[in-house]
Image (cartoon, rainbow, N blue to C red):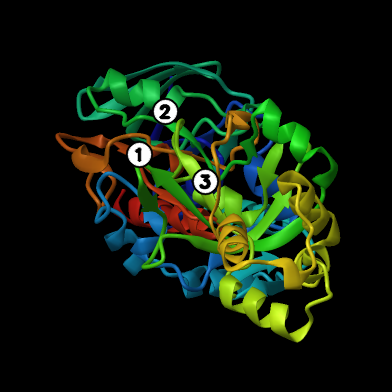
Amino acid sequence: MTQTDVVVIGAGAAGLMCALTAGYAGRRVLLIDHANKPGKKILMSGGGRCNFTNLATTPANFFSANPGFCISALKRYRPEHFVELVERHGVDYVEKAPGQLFCSESARDIVQLLLTECEWALVEIALKTSITSVERRGDGMRLQTSLGCIDAGAVVVATGGLSIPTMGATGFGYDLARQFGLNVTETRAALVPFTLTSQWKERAAGLAGVACDVGVSVIRDGTRLGPGRDRRYLEPMLFTHRGFSGPGMLQISSYWQPGDELEIDLLPGEPIGEALAQARTATPKRRLSTWLGERLPKRLASALTEWHGEDPALAELSNALIEAWSHRLGQWRLKPAGTEGWRTAEVTLGGVDTQAISSKTFEVDGLPQLRFIGEVLDVTGELGGYNFQWAWASGVACGQSL
């Protein structure tokens, strides 16, 4: 029989952060994971350089059925707090896009930072450890594991979601929540590439690797869905062999559901009809493909004229054709076949319903010895470092209250 104050299940970003915070508060902490190394998803994130926070993080950057839940933790542990920790460990970082901070060298620097802090906080880490049962035992919890029986004052579930099962993702956290009577909201893959129907795949076959900046929204039952006033993301799109990827498509996937259409503006910010009309007057002999090729990758410009069977000289563009091309370029609509699913999704949308969780301590209502943090909860950030900031903030808030 092993006895400890706290068992944290899951050695990812939230679990490591919670464990070291509780350890510094004087708690005996055992951190358990079934994987063979800690921080696997940290290591592969951001192309191996880990977009570890976003300086512009606000509650508006998160999806949840209970949107106010994340406010408390995000206020108490802000991006600058984690940046201070990164700087204290001498980890070099860069701001690749406004607010998005990445390691200059490798995501391994973030994992090593967290492991060093865990060591200093006297956290015991047990990897390659399976859990067969978790049950309430008086004022504490009892776990049956491959290490043997463990009695703990509290159990913190930081098992993450279902995305990227090859990294060890499972539904263990959701199963545990249901065991203790908690609701789990519908889960689906988010921040994930789209796949196209066979018709569109055939059309776009030669465009793999082509990227361009777009504005993208979801259209559902005639209603535009997306962030902000414009209801769209302004981010790059990438054509793949199977469909669409790139930041713009990953972002909008959090809004998309099967049956929805995508509406893509290939020339965001440009008044297309007005620009074509002016070009018709100024350079009437130029062909439409030439005009498109000055604004879009040439392969895409060529494909567009092929798809529509039209490449007139600009002088031949009637007002009706200008309106048609304005619509084709600025409101290109298509219905994806689906997404790449859990295999490549960066996060899980949905999760443990937060209505029965304290936003201050992350304990379960009526069962303070059981807590849930990080991605396993129904709190999902946009692309750009927000999900890591949620992991740090929820981990610290929970760790401080243990």
Which residue is identified by label 3?
Answer: 262
Q: Position of residue 344 (x, y in %)?
A: 65, 36
- The residue positioned 48% from the left and 70% from the top of the image is 79
Q: Position of residue 150 (x, y in %)?
A: 42, 23
Amino acid found under the numbered disc labelled 3: Leu
Which of the two labelled residues, at mark 3 and mark 2, occupies the earlier sequence position?
A: 2
Tell me the CA gap for discs 3 and 1.
34 Å
Q: Is residue 369 left or right of residue 191?
A: left
Quarter of the image with the N terminus is top left
- The residue positioned 14% from the left and 34% from the top of the image is 366
Tell me the CA gap for discs 2 and 1.
8 Å
Which residue is identified by label 1?
Answer: 372
Quarter holding residue 117: bottom right
Mark 2 Cα-neighbour bin, 10 Å: few <14, some 14–19, many ≥20: many
Which residue is identified by label 2?
Answer: 173
Q: Secondary structure at mark 1?
A: strand
Mark 3 Cα-neighbour bin, 10 Å: few <14, some 14–19, many ≥20: many
Mark 3 vs mark 2: give the one in front: 3
Q: Secondary structure at mark 3?
A: strand
Q: Nearer the viewer, residue 368 or 165?
A: 165
Q: Which mark is residue 144?
A: none
Tell me the CA gap for discs 3 and 2.
32 Å
Q: Position of residue 38 (x, y in %)?
A: 64, 40
Q: Nearer the viewer, residue 322 or 347?
A: 322
Which of the two labelled residues, at mark 3 and mark 1, occupies the earlier sequence position?
A: 3
